[in-house]
Image (cartoon, coloured by chain):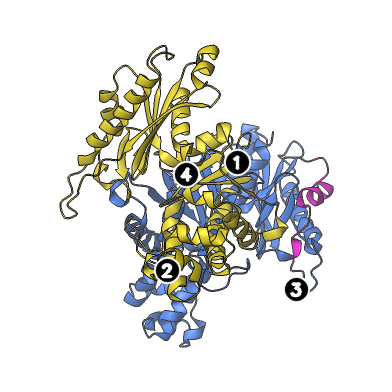
Chain colours: A blue, B yellow
Amino acid sequence: MARRAVTEAGTPLAFGVDIGGTKVLGAAVAAGGEVVAEARTSTPQVAIDPDEPVRGLAGAAVADAVADVVRALERELDAVAPGPSPVGVGVPGLVDRRGGVLRFSPNLPGAVGADMARLLAERLPGRLVRVDNDANCAALAELRQGAAAGVADALVVTLGTGIGGGVVQGGRVVGGAFGFAGEVGHMVVDPAGPPCPCGRRGCWERYASGGGLGRLAREAAYGGRLHEAVALAGGDPELVRGEHVTRAAMAGDPGALGVLDELGWWVALGLANLAAVLDPEVIVVGGGLAAVGELLLGPTRRAFADLVEGGRARPAIGIVPAAFGERAGAVGAALLGREAP
Amino acid sequence: MARRAVTEAGTPLAFGVDIGGTKVLGAAVAAGGEVVAEARTSTPQVAIDPDEPVRGLAGAAVADAVADVVRALERELDAVAPGPSPVGVGVPGLVDRRGGVLRFSPNLPGAVGADMARLLAERLPGRLVRVDNDANCAALAELRQGAAAGVADALVVTLGTGIGGGVVQGGRVVGGAFGFAGEVGHMVVDPAGPPCPCGRRGCWERYASGGGLGRLAREAAYGGRLHEAVALAGGDPELVRGEHVTRAAMAGDPGALGVLDELGWWVALGLANLAAVLDPEVIVVGGGLAAVGELLLGPTRRAFADLVEGGRARPAIGIVPAAFGERAGAVGAALLGREAP
């Protein structure tokens, strides 16, 4: 069915590939934004000696995986694709848009220093390849065809293992001077807080991410406030994970709902900081944690109304769920490829 | 001399007025950015009953003061100004650009709720009046003719009694959805920190402003680390102010230099947060504290290099002093008036 839609429309496809910490997800996207094919593989794990890291060692392996995913998509679409389609690639970290070099990446440390644009171009000859930060790609998807469609000034935040962000100003995803804008997870919200893989302490993503939920959950479990979730985890507080909390909360457990309230407060704290700086009309919340839905967004909205500067004296800022879920990065990467100048 | 310059060039003047917490400062600005006349008056202090605030009560008095300043400038320039000049006004707080209403202002609470654009237009008939946030005005001055001239993506931060900010993206001062962008002083950097007049705790401006310096200074004084500054304050640690610390530091006192190092760390913490979100090429530091110069900017740059995400792996971000000093807001307001559509 999807194939027919493409053939009938005759519109060129674009490929988008989202490099995650654990998987590489590819999507072939038609002009209307429909995903007509999907492919995925594992993110290559290259062991790094922290005392003597070989800069960019994993970059080639990661680029191989991206190329594999693109070729898998091309094979699947052979009958309908008229020729090489543009390829957009979302990379988790600071991608220098002046050269495509990955400058910094807590979640892909082995590829730091690699020129991803060059490595990908070598593996995908004849195709137009564009590289950007993964969360900027997700923001582009939400801006063009998702929850921020038609909004001039928006903020897209992805709450997953870490926190990514995309800043929309004047209807554009803004990159900043080097393409590094939107690294919202690494705002420090407590200089005495827990250490972060980025090297500092108390980054927002230590609190308002999946990892932050796990930490809040274990604290509550050891505090005796999380019986249902502990039972779901087999009885050991140390084994309580975010998924146990969200399952218990969906079943109405007060302890689990309390943990999600607390998580919502931390989400709101960072969003209020960002609202003070950026003044968005709408904040779009995506990523794995957003799948929890209103059980998280409700407490987030309530805490945000108290925390945002100006409070109820200022026009309200909408906090809405993302439209694209885990595919946002891949879809946005495809749009990036298509929109390449 | 200044008058002749205007007459010779024949360029229209613009008036800019910066409303501060203590003074209202006006400047007549020629096309090249030269200040050709200045006028000032005190900011009207209207007592507010915190239990029953009359919204906007002080707005009319503040607008009167602005109009007085503008008329004083016009009188002084009578011989050279060909007719009513555009007037830009910088207001400390959240000014809704859709209507000119002051929505929130910790430093001008009595004027909250006032429609500043309307009040000013009534008092300055026949003149084109534009209103914006004071720090956005300062950013415009630095962007057009100051330390951020020619820079596409910059951040202007004013460290004074509080902290203001202006975000430059793509060569424009961005206002956000409602004109409230750039309220960088109210990023929370420690939710358990000292209370802020904005209603929250641990805002960046509790640490990295003139008030923050005073707090650090008193802590150091009571800790016995600030003999010189305590002596300058007459021997009482409670009376130590920022100016005593900066004077002692300029004289080389190690204790005072240590306090400025600490202040620089807090300045750098917030700048690193903002760099993660905005990725500016240059950060311009203005406001009263910037007058301390390299004794503060040096420690700030060193701490920033450690605190910014990506550290030395990313291209360096310049941290430079503002060009316009305390006049930035008034000059920028004049530019705002001139650039009105």
Q: Amino acid at mark 1?
A: Asp
Q: Which residue is mark 3?
A: A50
Is residue A115 in the magenta section? Answer: yes
Q: On residue A154, which mark appears? A: 4
Q: Count the numbered circles shown.
A: 4
Left or right of B128? Residue A19 is right
Q: Nearer the viewer, mark 4 or mark 1?
A: 1
Q: Are marks 3 and 1 in contact (CB under 8 Å)?
A: no
**Sequence-first tag of 1 and 2:** 1
Q: Nearer the viewer, mark 3 or mark 2?
A: 2
Chain ID of residue with mark 1? B
Q: Quadrant of the C terminus of chain A?
A: top right
Q: Which residue is mark 2?
A: B218
Q: Residues within 10 Å of mark 3 (few under 14, many from 20)?
A: few
Q: Position of residue B193 (x, y in %)?
A: 40, 67
Chain ID of residue with mark 2? B
Left or right of B287? Residue A131 is right
The image quadrant that residue B61 belongs to is: top left
**Sequence-first tag of 4 and 3:** 3
Q: Secondary structure at mark 4?
A: strand
Q: Secondary structure at mark 3?
A: loop
**Residue A269 versus residue A178 in the image, above or below:** below
Q: Amino acid at mark 2?
A: Arg
Q: Which residue is mark 1?
A: B153
Q: Are marks 3 and 1 on the same chain?
A: no
Q: Secondary structure at mark 2?
A: helix
**Label 4 vs label 1: CA separation?**
18 Å
Q: Which range is magenta? A: A110-127
